[in-house]
């Protein structure tokens, strides 16, 4: 079942669609609270022997908290409730009435080992004030003292759409109902582990849901990877040409070549400035190496007639000849192509020219925020603020898949599909990381001829390899390269029946 990445408004619309199709709102609340309680018991079993404190606000998020409290009590957990304002929605009032006689209320002795944050839900905007702010601070003090902290839907104080926050709960686990909130992906350090719970919203999915961004997971990746048979030879595993490596920058192409080799390519040819051929041979000795073509005949020989796909841009530079090199490489064939880095920079604001050169072939572009801004004629602040939406227009104009690098990575297709890869760490925030990604995606582009599969699978595996390195400080791209085989081949842990996704906690 696909997990959708939603804004606060989209989350509310999905709830409303389920209600309109016959699922009572209180039923959704009860499903959410029951599943959340089961997750809290699974995660904090020993700490719950000390009891739990549940902090509830007046809205439906507080109602979820009352449901959680009831289930914990029925499992033998001693529960103390802290109410910030009287319950004011009909469902929250009803759930409070069903549970209030079985829990302790403020004034009783507070003991426990787990704090449940049910103060503010997805509708919150701005800065918490008054008793809500005090409760957020108290929960964080408990967390610092060793209590487990679970937030329902989003950590209170966090904007569910933008991820903006001042003082907010620092959760050990955030249990998200029915979809993954955009803001939690943008503020992972506040959320701890993120667990997405199925509450039945997908039973009422409409065509509008199909247009929402979809979370990529291991199952999705594994289902789209081509099988490398035991007797596959280098021709069947395809040939990839990587064009770049301007003077003084041979390392970018070498990293891209090594990323491709650790992703199952049959042969790589690095096409670099003549001055860099020896350096690339030393850094990637199993790659073939050729000098930049000086004319159409050479380009056709070394790229067009040899490769199954072409990566253009790593370390290419922005010299006067760079754009000519891109045009020459593209004109050498109609092969699938990936454009990265300076292969995009030389077309800044010239989107129509780039579209004409691509000519409808299978294509991926892989800009980071600044490269995207230059190409689309906007600014970095806008790109970051609208990262889940900003690439759709450019993808449609170019007829190419757009992989917008960042945290998270968002992939846009020409037909309007959006995919989100949540994997990765700050270990990828170093020069050369994107070159490895280009090599991975180029391999898949050669083997599948499918830009969306190539971009999305590459983004996921690249990020997962970084996570497997365990540390951020001290990790190098060598470590990421060596982690790629495990990232490609590890098995996913089975999920509980009600859980549709788990994202690991990141460093705070």
Image: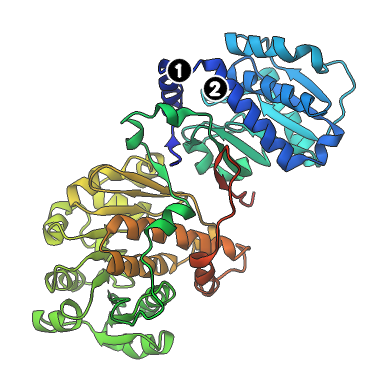
- Which mark is first along the chain, 1 or 2? 1
Residue at point 82% right, 29% down?
77
Position above or below: 41 against 449: above
270 left or right of 51? left
The residue tagged 1 is: 19
User: x and y percent of residue 418 in the render?
Assistant: 34, 44
User: x and y percent of residue 84 in the render?
Assistant: 70, 16
How many discs appear? 2
237 left or right of 502? left
Say what secondary structure mark 1 lies in: helix
Position above or below: 150 against 110: below
Sort mark 2 into few (<14), some (14-19) or many (20+) by Cα contacts within 10 Å: many
Residue farthest along the right direction in this orientation: 109
User: x and y percent of residue 300 in the render?
Assistant: 13, 79
Observer-nearest of 303 and 205: 205
Question: Do callouts 2 and 1 mark residues in contact (Cβ within 8 Å)?
Answer: yes
Q: Can residue 278 be seen in this view?
A: yes
State the image quarter where residue 486 is shown.
Answer: bottom right
Identify the disc placed on residue 78: none
Q: Quadrant of the N terminus?
A: top left
State the image quarter where residue 311 is shown.
Answer: bottom left
Sort mark 1 into few (<14), some (14-19) or many (20+) by Cα contacts within 10 Å: some
The residue tagged 2 is: 28
Give the spatial CA distance, label 2 vs label 1. Answer: 9 Å
Position above or below: 158 against 447: above
């Amino acid at each position: 079942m696909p997990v959708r990445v939603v804004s606060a408004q989209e989350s509310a619309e999905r709830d409303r669609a389920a209600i309109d199709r016959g699922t009572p709102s209180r039923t959704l609340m009860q499903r959410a609270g029951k599943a959340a309680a089961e997750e809290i018991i699974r995660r904090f079993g020993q700490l719950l022997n000390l009891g739990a404190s549940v902090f509830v606000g007046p809205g439906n998020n507080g109602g979820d908290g009352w449901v959680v409290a009831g289930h914990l009590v029925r499992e033998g957990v001693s529960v103390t409730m802290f109410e910030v304002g009287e319950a004011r929605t009909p469902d929250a009032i009803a759930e409070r009435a069903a549970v209030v006689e079985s829990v302790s209320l403020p004034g009783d002795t507070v003991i426990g080992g787990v704090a449940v944050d049910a103060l503010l839900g997805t509708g919150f905007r701005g800065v918490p004030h008054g008793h809500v702010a005090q409760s957020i601070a108290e929960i964080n003090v408990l967390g610092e003292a060793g209590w487990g902290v679970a937030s329902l839907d989003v950590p209170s104080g966090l904007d569910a759409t933008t991820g903006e926050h001042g003082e907010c709960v620092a959760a050990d686990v955030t249990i998200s109902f029915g979809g993954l909130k955009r803001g939690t992906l943008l503020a992972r350090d506040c959320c701890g582990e993120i667990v997405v719970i199925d509450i039945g919203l997908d039973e009422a999915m409409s065509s509008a849901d199909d247009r929402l961004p979809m979370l990529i997971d291991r199952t999705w990746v594994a289902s789209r990877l081509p099988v490398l048979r035991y007797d596959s030879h280098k021709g069947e595993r395809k040939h990839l040409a990587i064009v770049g490596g301007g003077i003084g920058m041979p390392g970018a192409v070498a990293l891209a070549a090594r990323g491709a080799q650790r992703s199952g390519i049959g042969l790589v040819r690095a096409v670099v400035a003549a001055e860099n051929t020896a350096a690339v041979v030393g850094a990637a000795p199993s790659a073939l190496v050729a000098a930049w073509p000086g004319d159409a005949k050479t380009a056709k020989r070394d790229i067009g007639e040899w490769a199954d796909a072409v990566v253009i841009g790593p370390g290419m530079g922005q010299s006067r000849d760079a754009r000519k090199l891109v045009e020459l490489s593209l004109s050498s064939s109609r092969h699938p192509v990936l454009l990265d880095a300076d292969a995009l920079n030389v077309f800044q604001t010239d989107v129509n020219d780039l579209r004409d050169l691509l000519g409808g072939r299978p294509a991926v572009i892989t800009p980071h925020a600044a490269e995207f801004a230059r190409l689309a004629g906007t600014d970095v602040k806008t790109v970051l603020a609208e990262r889940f939406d900003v690439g759709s227009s450019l993808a449609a104009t170019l007829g190419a898949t757009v992989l917008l690098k960042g945290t998270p990575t968002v992939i846009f297709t020409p037909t309007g599909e959006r995919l989100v890869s949540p994997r990765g760490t700050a270990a990828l925030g170093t020069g050369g990381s994107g070159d490895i990604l280009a090599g991975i995606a180029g391999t898949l582009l050669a083997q599948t001829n499918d830009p969306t599969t190539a971009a999305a699978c590459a983004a996921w595996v690249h990020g997962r390899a970084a996570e497997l390195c365990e540390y951020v400080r001290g990790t190098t791209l060598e470590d990421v390269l060596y982690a790629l085989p495990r990232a490609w081949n590890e098995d996913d842990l089975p999920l509980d029946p009600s859980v549709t996704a788990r994202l690991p906690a990141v460093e705070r």
